[in-house]
Image (cartoon, rainbow, N blue to C red):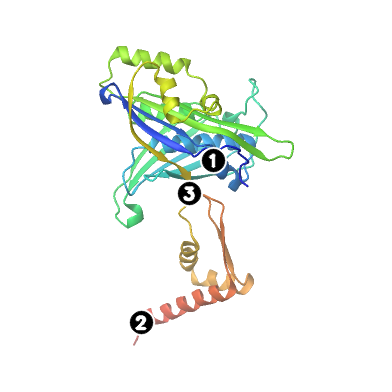
Amino acid sequence: MLNERTDTTTDTLVRATAAGGNIRCMAAVTTELVAEATARHGTSDTVAAALGRTLTGTLLLGAGLKEFDRLTVRIEGDGAAGGITAEANARGQVRGYVRNPEADAQLNSGGKFDVRAVVGRSGMFYVTYESGYDIGLYREPYRGSVPLVSGEIGEDFAYYLAKSEQIPSAVMLGVLVRARASGETFIDAAGGLMIQLMPGADEKTVAAVEEAVARTPHTTTLIRAGAGPVEMLRAALGDVPFEVLEERPVSFACSCSYERAVSLISSIEQRELESMLREDRGAAMTCHFCNSTYSIDESSLEEIVSRRVATTVGDAPRD
């Protein structure tokens, strides 16, 4: 079992608008998907918090994606984690990994997991929007990047939005990790919210939202108390009314498969394929995003090599 929860919480994301469309709001509960991701990758408690925040932030940032769109967030810091990558699509699915999932650090001065220490205090925050890639329609992707300003991740998402997309935003991301004597990591609560102030928002409304956000309890405190995304937004917006545009489930999901693994191995240079067959009597490929391993047995690898030989002979020039 990936996470021993006693409730029936389903991870959910809500997209809403306020102030006549001049404020865009997103909130999500991501406890289950963060639990699955951290269990799959065998993360330390501190990396669990870092990866969970990144997965949640990526889902929120990609809440408005259209069909066949894909959003990738990549954090390259100078900390021991060595980099974090997360990818979300329009279906509310997200996947991600940390280059060094076992990196760890001592608790910070406030007795909290020191995410900044494993992510790093300097580095870069990259965002890439792609459309049509999965159906073979190539379009030039949009790429944005800003320096890391915090390493705590929530502040880095906000800085990216302010500097790269010119959207002042409040971003709150949280992962409550409960360490156990057995050494296992338990995700007690995870989620976040993002409030974007568009250019048409009037000063009075902006001031009211800023004051409400400043008073908002931590996202994991709200989630542990039973709040869903709508209640989280209500707490963050205070007396400012809002309209829910969409509510949908979100989940950890990966697009890897045995067929894709075979396709990738089939593209390896002929000499290397023959070496794998001779020395390893098979092949294995592990997906970075979900840590699933696909094994190709000796007979299947022989078939791949034979097809390559036949193709090479068939393509050879003739006198």
Q: Quick one: quadrant of the C terminus?
A: bottom left
Q: Which residue is mark 2?
A: 317
Up/down of 272 relative to 54, above or below: below
Q: Position of residue 31 (x, y in %)?
A: 53, 37
- Crowding around mark 3 (Cα neighbors within 10 Å: few <14, some 14 to 19, many 20+) is some
Q: Which mark is residue 212?
A: none
Q: Earlier in the sequence, mark 2 or mark 1?
A: 1
- Crowding around mark 2 (Cα neighbors within 10 Å: few <14, some 14 to 19, many 20+) is few
At a point 45% along the width and 37% down the height, the residue shown is: 12
> Which amino acid lies under the numbered mark 2 shown in the image of this protein?
Pro
Res. 297 in view: yes
Up/down of 57 relative to 231, above or below: below
At a point 49% along the width and 39% down the height, the residue shown is: 10
- Crowding around mark 1 (Cα neighbors within 10 Å: few <14, some 14 to 19, many 20+) is many
At a point 50% along the width and 33% down the height, the residue shown is: 123
Residues 287 and 68: in front is: 68
Please, what secondary structure does the residue beneath circle 2 have?
A: loop
The answer to which image quadrant residue 221 occupies is top right
- Are the two marked residues, 2 and 1, in contact with CB atoms closer than 8 angstroms? no
> Which amino acid lies under the numbered mark 3 shown in the image of this protein?
Ala
Q: Which residue is mark 3?
A: 253
Furthest-right residue in this view: 181
Res. 83 in view: no
Q: Which residue is mark 1?
A: 32
Q: Earlier in the sequence, mark 2 or mark 3?
A: 3
